[in-house]
Image (cartoon, rainbow, N blue to C red):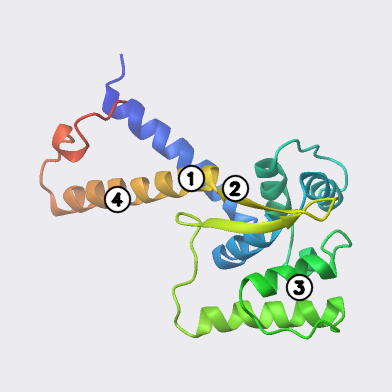
């Protein structure tokens, strides 16, 4: 019979391998994923699902905002490949830039708005401002519905938070395990290493 610690290690190794596989093929950086997800929150669910279907060439059918966001982010090569899609409208880009308080000429075409937006994101990253992380993103985006009334949508990127938490835990766990192993001391993983209410 396996000990709980061995089962925990097996689960962690499996999750690490899944995370490596899942994220090794993503060509968007963490900051790009967060920025695009924030922009996508301004789209209607129908448009978002349609965009996800286009990006995946109809191979995935998404039903929720979360599924659509993940499909778009996972299967896109670059930020520009997403922003140039037909469903990413000039109006959406303009509203996002307005929400971010970026001064924008209302006569700019879509290509110019895309350039302005990517430059804005690049500046935010290089100005030393704390870039958003998927673990703490909570965005309030104004979305315009068909009848042109506005509503505020609050979203959180929960699945990514879980993955990030698991990744941080495994980094901590294996650093601790390797440190004690390499020092030659006997290592005993005990309850003092975890919260009192944690379970395996």
Label 4 sits on residue: 172
Q: CA distance from mark 1 to mark 3?
A: 32 Å
Answer yes or no: do the residues labelled 4 and 3 have beta carbons within 8 Å?
no
Could you say which is closer to the camera, residue 79 or residue 103? 103
**Separation of marks 3 and 2 at Cα, in angstroms:** 32 Å
Work out how far the residue at label 2 is from the one at label 1, CA to CA, in angstroms: 10 Å
Tell whether label 1 touches label 2 (CB within 8 Å).
yes
Check the image and report above or below for 118 versus 43.
below
Residue under pointer 1: 163
Q: CA distance from mark 4 to mark 1?
A: 14 Å
* Disc number lying in front (3 or 2): 3
Q: Residues within 10 Å of mark 2 (few under 14, many from 20)?
A: few
Q: Residues within 10 Å of mark 1 (few under 14, many from 20)?
A: some
Label 3: which residue?
Answer: 94
In the image, which is nearer the foreground, mark 2 or mark 1? 1
The residues bearing labels 4 and 3 have C-alpha atoms spaced at a distance of 42 Å
Residue with the most extreme left position: 185
Q: Which residue is mark 2?
A: 22
Determine whether the residue tagged by mark 3 lies in a helix, strand or loop.
helix
N-terminal of the two: label 1 or label 3? 3
Quarter of the rendering containing residue 103: bottom right
The number of callouts visible is 4
Closer to the camera in the image, 38 or 22:
38
Residue 13 percent across, percent down from the top left: 42, 39
The x and y percentages for residue 194 are 22, 37
59 vs 43, left or right, is right
Helix, strand, or loop for circle 1?
helix
Query: Dots 4 and 1: beta carbons under 8 Å?
Result: no
Q: Secondary structure at mark 2?
A: helix
The percent position of residue 164, horizontal first and vertical second, equals 45, 50
């Amino acid at each position: 019979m396996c000990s709980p610690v061995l089962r925990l290690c097996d689960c962690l190794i499996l999750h690490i391998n899944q995370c490596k596989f899942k994220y090794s093929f993503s060509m968007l950086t963490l900051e790009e994923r967060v920025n695009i997800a924030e922009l996508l929150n301004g789209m209607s669910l129908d448009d978002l699902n349609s965009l996800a279907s286009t990006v995946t060439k109809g191979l995935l059918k998404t039903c929720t905002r979360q599924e659509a966001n993940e499909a778009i982010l996972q299967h896109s090569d670059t930020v520009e490949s997403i922003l140039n899609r037909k469903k990413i409208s000039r109006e959406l880009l303009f509203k996002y830039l307005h929400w971010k308080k970026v001064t924008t000429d209302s006569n700019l075409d879509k290509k110019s708005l895309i350039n302005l937006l990517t430059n804005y994101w690049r500046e935010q990253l290089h100005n030393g401002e704390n870039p958003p992380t998927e673990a703490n993103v909570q965005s309030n985006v104004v979305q315009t519905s068909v009848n042109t009334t506005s509503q505020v949508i609050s979203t959180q990127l929960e699945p990514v938070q879980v993955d990030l938490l698991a990744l941080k835990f495994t980094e901590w766990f294996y650093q601790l395990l390797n440190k004690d192993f390499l020092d030659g001391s006997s290592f005993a993983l005990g309850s003092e290493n975890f919260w009192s209410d944690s379970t395996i």
